Amino acid sequence: KQFQWRRDMFTTADASGPERIAPEWWGNKEALRDYWHVQTQQGRRLWLFHTPQDPRWYVHGEFA
């Protein structure tokens, strides 16, 4: 898969996940997120997530 982040295009080389982060049982159920560790062919290692309610993907952070 390809994706765009900060005006640059990236191609996924490897990915692991999902790692589901759920809110407290008494909290907001819409805060549910699935996180993926993504290695790009360009050498960047990113932490991406999406929510089941929203088909868009977001970059949560970058690994050094």
Image: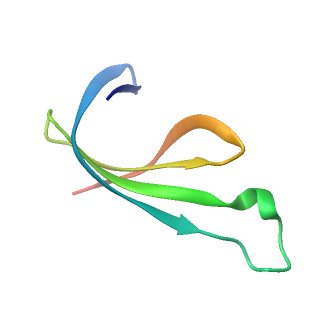
Answer with the quarter of the image where residue 37 lies. Answer: bottom left
The residue lying toward the viewer, choosing from 30 and 62, is 30
What residue sits 71% from the left and 72% below the top? 23
Q: Check the image and tell me how it is coloured.
A: rainbow
Query: Where residue 34 appears, x then y in whole percent?
Result: 53, 57
How many numbered markers are drawn?
Answer: 0
In the picture, measured across the screen, residue 48 lies left or right of residue 33, that is left
Query: Where residue 18 appears, x then y in whole percent?
Result: 44, 59
Query: Where residue 31 appears, x then y in whole percent?
Result: 72, 59
In the picture, measured across the screen, residue 25 lies left or right of residue 22, that is right
What residue sits 51% from the left and 41% below the top? 58
Relative to 54, does residue 18 appear above or below in the rendering? Answer: below
In the picture, measured across the screen, residue 15 lies left or right of residue 48, that is left
What residue sits 79% from the left and 80% below the top? 25
Relative to 45, does residue 43 appear above or below in the rendering? Answer: above
Query: Where residue 22 appears, x then y in whole percent?
Result: 65, 70
Which quadrant is home to the N terminus?
A: top left
What residue sits 14% from the left and 34% below the top? 41
The residue lying toward the viewer, choosing from 25 and 9, is 25
Which quadrant is home to the C terminus?
A: bottom left
Q: Residue furthest bottom?
A: 25
Answer with the quarter of the image where residue 28 lies. Answer: bottom right
